[in-house]
Every structure is written in C-alpha cells, then in structure tokens.
Amino acid sequence: MKLPYNMRLSALGERQQFYESFNLKKSRSWVGRKLVFAVIIGRHSAIYPAEYVKDKDEPLIIDNYHTLKDVHIQILKFLPEGVYYDRNYYKDFSLCHSYDLRKAWTWDNFLGQQLAFDLDPENVDCPIHGPSQERLAKGWGLGFCETAFKITSTNTVQLYDELKKNYTDVRIVFSGRGFHIHVFDKDTKILTRKERKAIASRYQKYGIDPWVTNGEMRLIRLPYSLNGLSSRVVLPLTVSEVAEFNPKHGALPFFV
C-alpha cells in the first residue's frame, strides 16, 4: 500500500499510547447522540494483538455498554486499526446486541440513518498514475499519491458547496486518508434506500463511495479516533481548512 505525506501504519504500541488518552466524550459530543460503536482490529494493516487473530478482519460491535468508560476499555483491549460509529438510529439501543445490525433496514427497531459521503483518493482518476481501476489492477489497493489526494480535497469542497444548497448542518471530517461529509439535517434521517441511491448516483462524479451514501455501509470512522492505516487523526475540519489541508503536517497524532 503506497501512501504519500509520510503516512504509515501505526504499531500496536502507538495505538495503545494514543487510546490511553483518548477522549470518547469529545467524539460523542461531535455526533450528538448515543452511539453504537465498532472496531476493526487488523483487516488491512495485518497488525493486531495475537489473541484476536480470528476476529481481526470483521467489525466488532460495541453496543452493550453502560458508560463511555466501558467502551474505552474495549478499545484498549482490541487496539484496533480503526474505530467507527453506527450511523443508524434505533428506538431501543438495548436490543442492538441481540440483533444482526446488517439487516437493520427491515427491523422495527430501526428509525433511520444519518446521511454521509465518503471521498477517498483511491477512487479518483489520477492524471499521473491513471484511472482508479488501473491502479487497483497494479496492486495499489488502498494506496494513492499526492495528486489524487489534492483532487479529492477539491472534490470535497465542491461537494460541500453543492450540499449546502439543500442542507443546513453539513460537516467535513478528514478520515485519515480522504474525507467524510456528514449531513445532520433531521429530515435526511428518514430517506429511503431508493432516495439514497439516487443521491449517491447524483454525486458520484466527486468520487464518493456509493455504499456509504446509499445506506449499505452504516459504519463510519469516529471523529478524533486514530486511523491506524495512515497514522493520522480522524479530524473535523471547516470547509476553508480543507482547501489548505496538508496531511504531512496536519492531523498528526503525538507519536508521529
């Protein structure tokens, strides 16, 4: 996996250092509601505590907790490459741990889903290294170059400006590699799958991942957590900050 801006995988010890002082209250306050959390231990990095080799590739859901301290303990136990939250809304969170949340759209406990867009630099065509599909065929996988990142940051600003024509509460987050755009307007929560697919199709030109926007992928990186694939903090940014943002110097965890 080729990454620019001195990005690199985080070692287990670095993950532990980061999460020992991690403030989950700050993350939950940014989202603004009770959350179902999830971790992915080592799917892409192949770096994980040896005792969790059987679980390293699958999202592990953290929903049966009493306090954020309980969640923090779980994160420190798994030392994951990524921490996520579930964008779905539920009537009764106590029922989540006994249900397959991948089928939530047909569950009577399901209330809706927060609208989001995922823009990653590996999904854009690069004038230097070629179309995204060609780069994938060459084995780049999740890798990208500085040019692809700059195209993605430009696309993010343009998509934000488009969305602001229709929505009020639109927020940008640097994902550690690309960008997420979150739409918190209440009326978007009840959008149907058909409506979401139409939205994903409308904005596909910006290089978004349609699975996130159409509701297929409900998990998204938790703001202020660590992206262990790049050793960068998942950081909320203003739209003006995005245009000038350089991951070589920005969103650095203290261990870099």
Image (tube, helix red, strand yellow):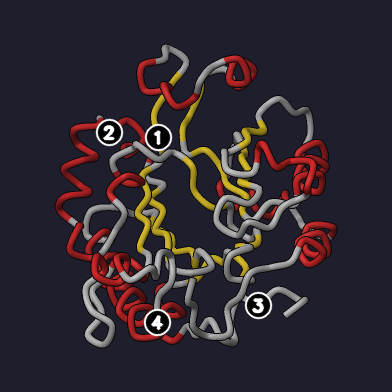
Label 3 belongs to which residue? 252
Label 2 belongs to which residue? 191
Q: Residue furthest front?
A: 138
Q: Earlier in the sequence, mark 2 or mark 1?
A: 1
Name which residue type carries label 3. Leu
Write the residue at 72% across / 52% down.
48
Measured Cα–Cα span from mark 2 to mark 4: 35 Å
Residue 138 higher or lower than 86, as above or below: below
> Which quadrant is the C terminus positioned in?
bottom right
Label 4 belongs to which residue? 145
Q: Is residue 248 left or right of residue 27?
A: left
Q: Earlier in the sequence, mark 4 or mark 1?
A: 1
Label 1 belongs to which residue? 113
Q: Position of residue 77 (x, y in %)?
A: 81, 44
**Dot 2 lies on which element?**
loop
**Dot 3 lies on which element?**
loop
Q: Nearer the viewer, residue 172 or 17?
A: 17
Marks 3 and 1 in Cβ contact (< 8 Å): no
Q: Earlier in the sequence, mark 2 or mark 3?
A: 2
Q: Earlier in the sequence, mark 3 or mark 4?
A: 4
**Dot 1 lies on which element?**
strand
Name which residue type carries label 4. Cys
